[in-house]
């Protein structure tokens, strides 16, 4: 890393970046001169003269085979063990005469679901797992129950306890300590906890545990418990991306093992036929992306009339501009019971005050707000570095970073789909094992890219925002924000792909004058996590303050969005509904583009 100017303290970023910015390799050990022309950096590929063409990138070069893990037990495409009244297939339980009859243990299925202790394909908790206990937790609302300190039955069901043991979870994370009793006593919850701190278990454990104890509800209009041609899930979990929905489904499969609960997943981009056939068999716990769920409801394949638990994972994103109308239609415009007759659970690592305000429409008034650490803060397990790199030097700086990276997987975020393809091509031309995931790739390309990355066949994944939230990929040791996002919450989620479950990780961001809109938020996030704040960020913050150019959420103080917004009423300046004026952080839209982003091309999008 010699020569990299990371967080140097002299100079003014806006006036002369070369004074203190990234120094490309070909200019090192020379007296500093004018900035080099774009593309002249030594490591850059010779774009001409290569018959392959710059856009020749393809997973084919990286061995894009499938991940081989989609079939078998609970496969959403394959045949499944008996329905709850039936014989019960391997690893499946039944609900008989008002009692839960767990299925027999099956070593082969256990290996498939839980792996072996040192299997690198499964995330194992890291050296800092115990330090989660030191994170301050605040639970606000009336009559908050005491947290648990260990996994115990009660409140957890015995079978769930066995599955937790199989997953080798020895103690609950802070969010789980609180969410388990809160959900078990039937309260609604808005929970905010750092990335990688076990929120998925935070909702799955109590929801499944209660379901195991209570059994299926009798479906109105159907005889007994047979589902016939329409699925009547008791629990619906919605997530913003297909990959995240699949991942939650995979987690649900583990903890449903040997139980009567059938998990299913539906998401766009995959053939609907398989998913429809699956629905025909019935489904108790449904994980879904909103678009495909709406489609299934419209086709009459899913009824929400039986829903007891509604979970919004990445809830702030789900209630954001892109999804709010769809979510409202599903929750309020179909046959889902009203909030008073269901439990609504929202989880995320970030929860801006405007979204909290909006979320009340879906919750009972006495919901509990849980914050583990500061809302929207990053884990101290992630070492964050910000480098000043001019746009023209980014490729070269990236090659340097990659050359000096520790072994492990590197996830690189860019702002546009076009840039994702271009950068991946560039890296492949440097003989690096890179692949890409973004919304313009087909679902099977996305799945292949992710599988190649997870297996290490491609150790670099270039991604747009589609991979920013929720994905839990073991051994991601480095996240690089090649392009910084315009919204600081997006930054928090992106870097959270490393440093998960008590493991440590590194996050590097390339910053330059185009990122003025995120600078204040970035300084706050770095300071909160006790990370170094380079002087050029402070300079840029001062300058952008002077020019009044901070328009996105990233540019404003986050102090008003870091706790239960109910406790900020009166005197608070969260600004009311989105788009309202007077908010201290600038009110409204969560635009992540804005004036500051230099990357041209198409927008990243979620789909
Ligand atoms: N009690 C536990 N003990 C050990 N590991 C755990 C425990 N709970 C969860 N994990 C593991 O921690 C990792 C992160 O969990 P999870 O994906 O639920 O995090 P998250 O908080 O939802 O993150 P994000 O905000 O990125 O969505 C997973 O690999 C999960 O298996």
Image (spheres, helix red, strand yellow):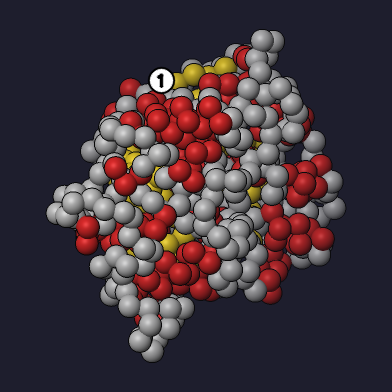
Residue 184 can be seen, yes or no: no
Q: Residues within 10 Å of mark 1 (few under 14, many from 20)?
A: few
Q: Nearer the viewer, residue 216 or 521?
A: 521
Residue 184 in the figure: left or right of residue 72: right
Please tell me which residue is depicted at 59% across the width and 30% down the height of the picture: 548
Percent coordinates x, y for residue 43 in the rendering: 26, 68
Give the residue displayed 51% in from the left and 32% down from the top. 544
Q: Is residue 603 left or right of residue 178?
A: right
**Quadrant placement of the C terminus:** bottom right
**Image spot of residue 9 (x, y percent):** 28, 32
Front residue (pair 313, 344)? 313
Q: Does any portion of residue 416 appear in the rendered image?
A: yes
Residue 585 drawn at (x, y percent): 61, 27
Quadrant of res 276:
bottom right
- Residue 458, image quadrant: bottom left
Residue at x 58%, y 68% (from the top left corner): 440
Closest to the observer: 485 or 43?
A: 43
Residue in front for this viewpoint, 336 or 370: 370
Q: Residue 55 vs residue 297: left or right?
A: left
Above or below — where is 126 with respect to 136?
A: below
* Residue at the disc numbered 1: 136
Identify the residue shown where x is 67% and y is 42%.
Answer: 320
Q: Is residue 541 above or below residue 487?
A: above
């Amino acid at each position: 890393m010699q020569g990299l100017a990371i967080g140097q303290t002299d100079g003014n970023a806006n006036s002369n970046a070369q004074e203190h910015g990234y120094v490309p390799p070909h200019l090192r050990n020379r007296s500093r001169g004018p900035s080099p022309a774009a593309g002249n950096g030594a490591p850059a590929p010779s774009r001409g003269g290569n018959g392959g063409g710059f856009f020749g990138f393809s997973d084919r070069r990286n061995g894009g085979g499938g991940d081989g893990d989609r079939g078998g037990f609970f496969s959403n495409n394959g045949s499944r063990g008996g329905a709850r009244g039936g014989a019960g297939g391997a690893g499946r339980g039944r609900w008989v005469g008002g009692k839960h009859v767990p299925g027999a243990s099956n070593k082969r299925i256990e290996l498939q679901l839980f792996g072996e202790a040192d299997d690198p394909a499964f995330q194992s908790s890291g050296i800092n797992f115990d330090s989660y206990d030191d994170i301050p937790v605040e639970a606000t609302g009336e009559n908050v129950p005491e947290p648990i300190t260990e996994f115990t039955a009660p409140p957890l069901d015995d079978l769930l306890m066995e599955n937790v043991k199989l997953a080798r979870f020895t103690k609950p994370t802070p969010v789980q300590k609180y969410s388990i009793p809160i959900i078990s006593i039937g309260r609604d919850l808005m929970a905010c906890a750092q990335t990688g701190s076990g929120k998925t278990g935070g909702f799955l454990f109590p929801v499944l545990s209660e379901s195991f104890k209570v059994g299926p509800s009798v479906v109105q209009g159907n005889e007994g418990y047979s589902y016939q041609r329409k699925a009547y899930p008791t629990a619906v979990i919605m997530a913003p991306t297909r990959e995240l929905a699949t991942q939650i489904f995979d987690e649900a499969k583990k903890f449903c093992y040997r139980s009567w609960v059938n998990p299913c997943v539906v998401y766009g981009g995959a053939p609907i036929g398989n998913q429809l056939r699956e629905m025909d068999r019935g489904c108790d716990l449904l994980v879904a992306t909103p678009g495909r769920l709406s489609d299934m409801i419209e086709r009459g394949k899913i009824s929400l009339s039986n829903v007891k638990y509604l979970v919004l994972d990445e809830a702030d994103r789900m209630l954001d501009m892109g999804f709010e109308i769809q979510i409202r239609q599903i929750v309020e415009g179909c046959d889902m019971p009203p909030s008073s007759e269901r439990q609504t659970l929202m989880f995320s690592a970030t929860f801006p005050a405007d979204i909290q305000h909006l979320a009340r429409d879906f919750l009972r008034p006495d919901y509990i707000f849980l914050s583990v650490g500061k809302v929207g803060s990053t884990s101290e397990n992630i070492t964050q570095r910000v480098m000043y790199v001019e746009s023209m030097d980014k490729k070269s700086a990236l090659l340097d970073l990659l050359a000096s990276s520790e072994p492990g997987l590197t996830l690189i975020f860019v702002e546009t789909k076009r840039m994702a393809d271009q950068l991946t091509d560039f890296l492949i031309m440097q003989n690096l094992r890179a692949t890409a995931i973004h919304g313009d790739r087909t679902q099977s390309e996305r799945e292949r890219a992710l599988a190649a990355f997870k297996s290490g066949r491609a150790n670099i994944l270039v991604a747009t925002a589609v991979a920013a939230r929720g994905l839990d990929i073991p051994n991601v040791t480095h996240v690089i924000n090649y392009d910084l996002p315009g919204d600081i919450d997006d930054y928090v989620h992106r870097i959270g792909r490393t440093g998960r479950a008590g493991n440590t990780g590194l996050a590097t961001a390339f910053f330059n004058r185009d990122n003025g809109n995120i600078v204040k938020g970035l300084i706050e996030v770095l300071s909160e996590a006790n990370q170094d704040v380079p002087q050029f960020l402070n300079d840029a913050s001062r300058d952008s303050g002077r020019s009044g150019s901070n328009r996105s959420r990233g540019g404003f103080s986050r102090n008003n969005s870091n706790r239960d917004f109910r406790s900020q009423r009166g005197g608070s300046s969260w600004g009311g509904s989105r788009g309202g004026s007077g908010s201290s952080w600038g009110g409204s839209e969560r635009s992540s583009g804005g004036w500051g982003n230099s990357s041209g091309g198409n927008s990243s999008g979620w789909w």
